[in-house]
Amino acid sequence: MGPPSDYLDSPPGQAHAACCRQRRCLLKGCEQLFRPVHPLCRYCSEACTAEARRWSQWRANRRYRASEQGRERRREQSRRWRALARQRQKSACSTASEGYQKEPPDSEFCCSRPGCYEQFRGSRRSPLKKFCSFFCRQALRRVLQRERRWRRRHLRPAIVSRCPVYRLRP
């Protein structure tokens, strides 16, 4: 028997919490057991959700900085900064830095698990590697499989019942 019809409308932590088993938080470093308020919840708290969002932004920024347009914008930013620094510096003894570290080489990648800032080098043997370790890969794989099963069980029957073509089939 499936979840009640008011499954998604009920307040968090009440009727529908009983149908979801405990699971581990996907965020690397947290990994606490928690009881989700919705079957597709990945994180145990708002703090973990916010940290995963920060990680996502960090990763997107890193990817953008590696692109040609991102490098060009960074060069423009550096030019502006140097011009302002020259205006501010009247004396030659002041020490100013660019403010950013040198970008890592292209062959260095970061892990695809939320919250994992580990970086690793690509290899000829596995050029499409996306995770720093077996545990990070397994954690994300577990979550994606669980979400896929939930969608197959809960979303597919609703589509079939609404579509007249599927209702005609025995």
Image: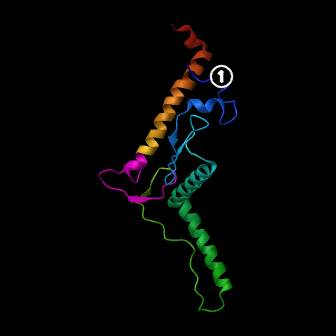
Please, is residue 142 above or below residue 56 in the view? above
Q: Tag 1, which secondary structure?
A: loop
Foreground: 37 or 27? 37
Q: Residue at x 57, y 45 (%)?
A: 44
Q: State which quadrant residue 164 falls in.
A: top right
Q: Residue 37: say if magenta.
A: no
Q: Residue at x 52, y 9 (%)?
A: 169
Please, is residue 25 above or below residue 81 in the view? above
What coloring was used for the rendering?
rainbow
Residue 33 in percent (x, y) is at 52, 44
Q: Disc 1 residue type?
A: Ser
Residue topped by disc 1? 5
Q: Which residues are magenta?
A: 114-137
Q: Quadrant of the N terminus?
A: top right
The answer to whether residue 60 is seen in the rendering is yes
Which secondary structure dominates the residues rendered in magenta? loop
Q: Residue furthest left?
A: 125
How many numbered discs, if any? 1
Q: Residue at x 56, y 69 (%)?
A: 75
Q: State which quadrant residue 35 falls in.
A: top right
Q: Is residue 152 left or right of residue 130?
A: right
Foreground: 93 or 83? 93
Q: Residue 133: say if magenta.
A: yes
The answer to whether residue 128 is seen in the rendering is no
Query: How packed is label 1: few (under 14 Cα within 10 Å), some, or many (20 or more)?
Result: few
Residue 31 in percent (x, y) is at 50, 49
Q: Residue at x 52, y 50 (%)?
A: 27
Residue 134 in percent (x, y) is at 37, 49
Residue 137 in percent (x, y) is at 41, 46
